Image: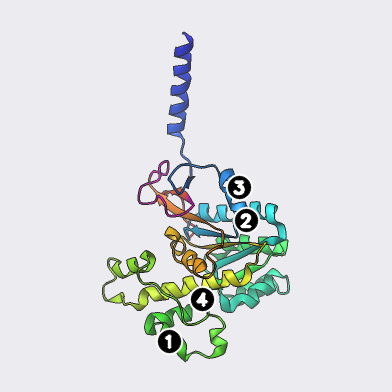
Amino acid sequence: MNRFQILLFVLLFLFSAFKSDKPAYLLYTKEGKTVKYSKMLKELEDADVVLFGELHNSPISHWLELEVTKDLYALKENNLILAAEMFETDNQIILSEYVDSLISTSRFEDEAKLWPNYKTDYKPLVEFARKNKLQFVASNVPRRYASLVNSKGFEGFEELTDEAKAFLPPLPIKYDPELNCYKSMMEMEGMGAHVTPNFPKAQAIKDATMAHSILQFWKPGKQLIHYHGAYHSENFESIYWYLKQVNPNLNIVTIHSVSQADNTKLTEKNTGKADYTICVDEDMTSTR
């Protein structure tokens, strides 16, 4: 066997080995090219805000959220701030009390409004903040106010007390119905009469509140990582759009999550939705 034949054999072997590999996830750039985690982390290091869009039931999303957080903490230490959609602004006091070790785990978990998958998916992040004495921001709008918008529009806020309005971003709420993230909600199949002009506004108040919460806690020299459902920062809209309305100079890096039957090549539909996209095999087990 000559050198050329040996080289050809080696290349065929490597190609077949790659083809038989089954990666649980791959990372992609905005252009749809595969990228190493270490390269993504290097860009994240310089960000003011990292918007991490997860698949709520994906163990890969939740594992990477924790790994990214650990690695950013190693770089930023106490200049890192954590924030999440999964906690509402009226739970900030109890969340802070727990992270500051002022109340017990049982008291916190009994009294806070926690998502059903809190213990498997979000508790590791909260415990990391508690262990390392990091701020953890409860960023989302109280769900009763999102329901109020869905029924009465933003005008419903006029009936609230000043005390209640403290859990909201400054009024009136800026809103662009032509943004695809809201416009597409009016065209959702199967919703029928349930879709009213207030339906996307209920989504917008969540985005606006999360952006406002981020801006309240972020300061120059700090870095804030925000965890939320992928839709809330997809296509550089939603939370991203609201942040840029207030501070266009903010350096924001977005991470998106998708699921595909074949995750070894990002589909055209899933390309360009964020600075980095986590593509998970759709057969991955679910956390709920």
Is 259 in front, or is 166? 166
Is label 3 or label 2 in front? 3
| Mark 3: secondary structure | helix
Q: State which tag comes first along the sequence, 3 or 2.
A: 3
Q: Amino acid at mark 1?
A: Gly
Please name the amino acid that badge 3 sits on: Lys
| Element assignment for label 1 | helix
The image's mark for residue 69 is 2
The structure residue drawn at horizontal position 59% and vertical position 77%, both measured from the top left corner, is: 91
Identify residue for label 1: 156
Q: Which residue is mark 4?
A: 141
Point out the stretch of residues depicted in magenta: 262-277
The answer to the question of whether label 3 and label 1 lie on touching residues, with beta carbons closer than 8 A, is: no
In the drawing, what numbered circle is on residue 89? Answer: none
Give the color scheme: rainbow, by chain, secondary structure or one colour. Answer: rainbow
Taking 57 as reference, is 243 above or below it? below
Residue 50 seen in the figure:
yes
Question: Is the residue marked by circle 4 packed among few (<14), some (14-19), or many (20+) residues within 10 Å?
Answer: many
The alpha-carbon separation of the residues under discs 4 and 1 comes to: 14 Å
Q: Tell me how far mark 2 sits from mark 4, CA to CA.
A: 23 Å
Does 204 lie within the magenta span? no
Query: 78 or 90, which lies in front?
Result: 78
What's the CA distance linking mark 3 and mark 4?
A: 32 Å
Identify residue type, mark 4: Val
